[in-house]
Amino acid sequence: MTTGPLAAGQDGDAFRADIAEVARTRVVGDELVIESWHPGTGLRRVARR
């Protein structure tokens, strides 16, 4: 959602992000690590071999 122009002297527009979920998936050593965040639930980390 665009919130309007930036402060004077700057080019571009400002945006607002309404985030419902964030997930990060990566390999660490021999494990698949999945980290996720949800509002109200917080951070959750799962590691699988």
Image (cartoon, rainbow, N blue to C red):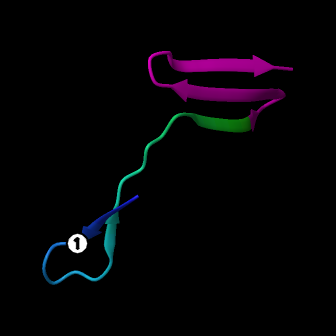
Q: What stretch is highlighted in magenta?
A: 27-49
* 35 on left or right of 32: left
* 4 on left or right of 28: left
**Within 10 Å of the Cα at label 1, are there few (<14), some (14-19), or many (20+) other Cα atoms?**
few
- Choose between 4 and 30: the one closer to the eye: 4
| Picture coordinates of residue 47, whole percent (x, y) | 74, 19
Please give the name of the residue rendered at 22% of the width and 72% of the height, measured from the top-left corner.
6
Q: In which quarter of the image is the N terminus?
A: bottom left
Residue highlighted by disc 1: 6
Q: Is 20 colored magenta in this rendering?
A: no
Please give the name of the residue rendered at 43% of the width and 43% of the height, measured from the top-left corner.
18
Please give the name of the residue rendered at 48% of the width and 40% of the height, measured from the top-left corner.
19
| Picture coordinates of residue 25, whole percent (x, y) | 71, 37
| Picture coordinates of residue 34, whole percent (x, y) | 70, 28
Q: Is 46 colored magenta in this rendering?
A: yes
Please give the name of the residue rendered at 60% of the width and 28% of the height, measured from the top-left corner.
36
- Choose between 21 and 27: the one closer to the eye: 21
